[in-house]
Structure formats: C-alpha cells, structure tokens
C-alpha cells in the first residue's frame, strides 16, 4: 500500500471513530469558546463578516459561531475525511470545502481574515511545518489572525516506565491523553515523528497498568478500542517541543496570545493566536 493510500485508510477509520474520541485529541467547549472569542473580536473591530479558512474539516471549528455572511473555506488533503465529516450538521450557509495541500494553498495572497485549525502541525511532517506557516502568512490579510491548537512534546522525554507509574496512579486522565503521552515517548526525534504502530506496541506494555483503569470515565472498552487502528499502522504524527514549534512559525508569524484548556494533557495542547510577520 502506498503512503498516500495508507494515510487515506487511516483517516477513513479515524472519521468512523470520531464519536469515541475525547479531549485532548478533539477540541472541547473551552477550545471552541476560545476560537469564537477571536471571531467575535475581529468581527466587532472590522465591522463585517470575515473571509475564513479552516485547515482540515474539524466539525467543532466548522460549526462554531461564525457570523452571518462569513465566507468559510475548509481545506483538507484527505478526500476520505472530507467525505466522512463534511458537511457537518449546523454548518454555516455558503461554507465550502476544497481538497488541497496546506503547503500550497489554492488561495490568493492576503485573501483570509481568520484562519483556524486544530492539531494541524502534528498531522504534517515537521519538515513541512515552516512551509505551512509561510503559506498561512501569505494568505492572511495584514489585519488577519491565525488561531491554532497544537500537540507537543515536553522538553524532557518521559520514559515508558514513568508513564506506566502515572497510569497506575490515575494521573493520566483518559486513554486519549495516554495516546499522545506514548507518542512523545516513542518519537525518536521530531523529524522522524511517532509511528502509530509503535504507539500500539508501547500501549501493549502498559496493559497491566491500564487494566486498573478500565471501565472508568475515559477508559471504556470502545474508547480503548480506538487504539486498534494504530496496530501495524506506518502513519506518523509529529510532536514538537515548544522551541521546535517556534522554529517553524517565528520566521513568518508573530505570536500574540497563548493559552491552554482544562482537560488532561492540556499543558501540551497549547492554543496560539498569530498574526503575519
């Protein structure tokens, strides 16, 4: 199977499991309120509805409180995800989706007032992060803003034994936070990324600790079962440290705001607001 076909198969399975996924892997009400606050402030200042860009087809962002008249374009390179998640119930009138590449956006310079995304830099190879930042800066209006939630790694890599102790002590929160903590453990470098199959292998080593949590909130059998698609999966996600993320954004984007939510692992899932440099 080609890399492109493998990615399409993964995203197709992921879309079918989306209802079983919780924060931190998907945005919660606080993340949506964060984005809606940005939309509201920009709209109040500009006195008109924005030209908006959604990187991906995250339903929670597509259906947040966009003002009437918003011209929303969603851009995703996976036809499988588009087919599964678009159009989302409650989508703003006139919203459109385009199958395309974040590294070469089919959009004119300075044509976007508000760009939003969730976990986009993790889904793309770290080496492409700078290109994505450059493209976002290119399509943003000089008065535009870019809001993005990121998934990152700590500066000091956690050991699997430490993670097992944290799970057993009830300190991980839910299986979805566990996935990303394992990812940061098995990722040899941000350039190499974390192979999903390696996350699954490491999860098997944590089974004894996880067994103590099974059945509790965030640890149901269906939720644990979302890891099944990771088995033998060669797709990779990329988890930069704060410094590594800054390296692929700072040349093109100016950070204006940074915050985090209140769910498990929120300290590694930072919310940023940027303007073009």
Image (spheres, helix red, strand yellow):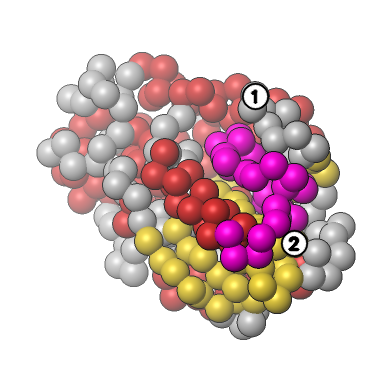
In this rendering, position of residue 269 left or right of residue 109: left
Magenta-colored stretch includes residue 59: yes
Quarter of the figure that contains the N terminus: top right
Residue under the point 63% across and 44% down: 66
Question: Along the line of sight, which residue is nearer the eye, 96 or 23?
Answer: 96
Magenta-colored stretch includes residue 150: no
Residue under the point 32% across and 57% down: 267
Residue under the point 36% across and 56% down: 260
Q: Which residue is mark 1?
A: 89
User: For the residues marked 2 and 1, what is the alpha-carbon distance in whole angstroms?
Assistant: 24 Å
Could you tell me if the residues under marks 2 and 1 are in contact, i.e. CB atoms within 8 Å? no
Magenta stretch in the rendered image? 44-73
Q: Which mark is residue 236?
A: none
Q: Which mark is residue 112?
A: 2
Residue projecting furthest to the left: 169
Question: Along the line of sight, which residue is nearer the eye, 75 or 216?
Answer: 75
Secondary structure under tag 1 reads loop
Say if 171 sits above or below 248 in the image.
above
Within 10 Å of disc 1 (Cα), the crowding (few <14, some 14-19, many 20+) is: few
Q: Position of residue 53 (x, y in %)?
A: 71, 53
Quarter of the figure that contains the C terminus: bottom right
Residue under the point 20% across and 50% down: 162
In this rendering, position of residue 30 left or right of residue 212: right
For the question of whether residue 44 can be seen, the reply is yes
């Amino acid at each position: 199977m080609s890399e492109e076909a493998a990615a399409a198969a993964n995203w197709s399975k992921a879309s079918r499991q989306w209802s079983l996924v919780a924060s931190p892997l998907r945005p919660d009400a606080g993340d949506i309120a964060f984005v809606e606050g940005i939309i509201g402030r920009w709209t109040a200042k500009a006195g008109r509805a924005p030209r908006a860009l959604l990187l991906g087809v995250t339903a929670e962002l597509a259906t947040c409180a966009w003002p009437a008249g918003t011209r929303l374009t969603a851009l995703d390179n996976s036809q499988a995800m588009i087919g599964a998640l678009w159009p989302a119930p409650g989508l703003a009138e006139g919203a459109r989706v385009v199958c395309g590449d974040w590294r070469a956006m089919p959009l004119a310079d300075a044509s976007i007032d508000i760009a939003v995304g969730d976990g986009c830099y993790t889904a793309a190879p770290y080496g492409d992060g700078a290109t994505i930042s450059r493209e976002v800066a290119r399509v943003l209006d000089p008065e535009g803003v870019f809001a993005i939630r990121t998934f990152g790694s700590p500066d000091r890599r956690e050991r699997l034994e430490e993670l097992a102790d944290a799970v057993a002590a009830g300190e991980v929160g839910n299986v979805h936070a566990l996935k990303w903590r394992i990812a940061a453990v098995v990722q040899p470098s941000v350039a190499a990324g974390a192979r999903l199959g390696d996350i699954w292998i490491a999860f098997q080593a944590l089974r004894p600790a996880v067994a103590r949590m099974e059945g509790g909130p965030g640890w149901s059998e269906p939720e644990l079962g979302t890891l099944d698609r990771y088995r033998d999966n060669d797709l990779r996600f990329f988890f930069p440290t704060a410094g590594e993320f800054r390296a692929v954004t700072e040349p093109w984007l100016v950070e204006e705001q940074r915050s985090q939510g209140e769910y498990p692992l929120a300290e590694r899932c930072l919310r940023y607001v940027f303007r073009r440099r």
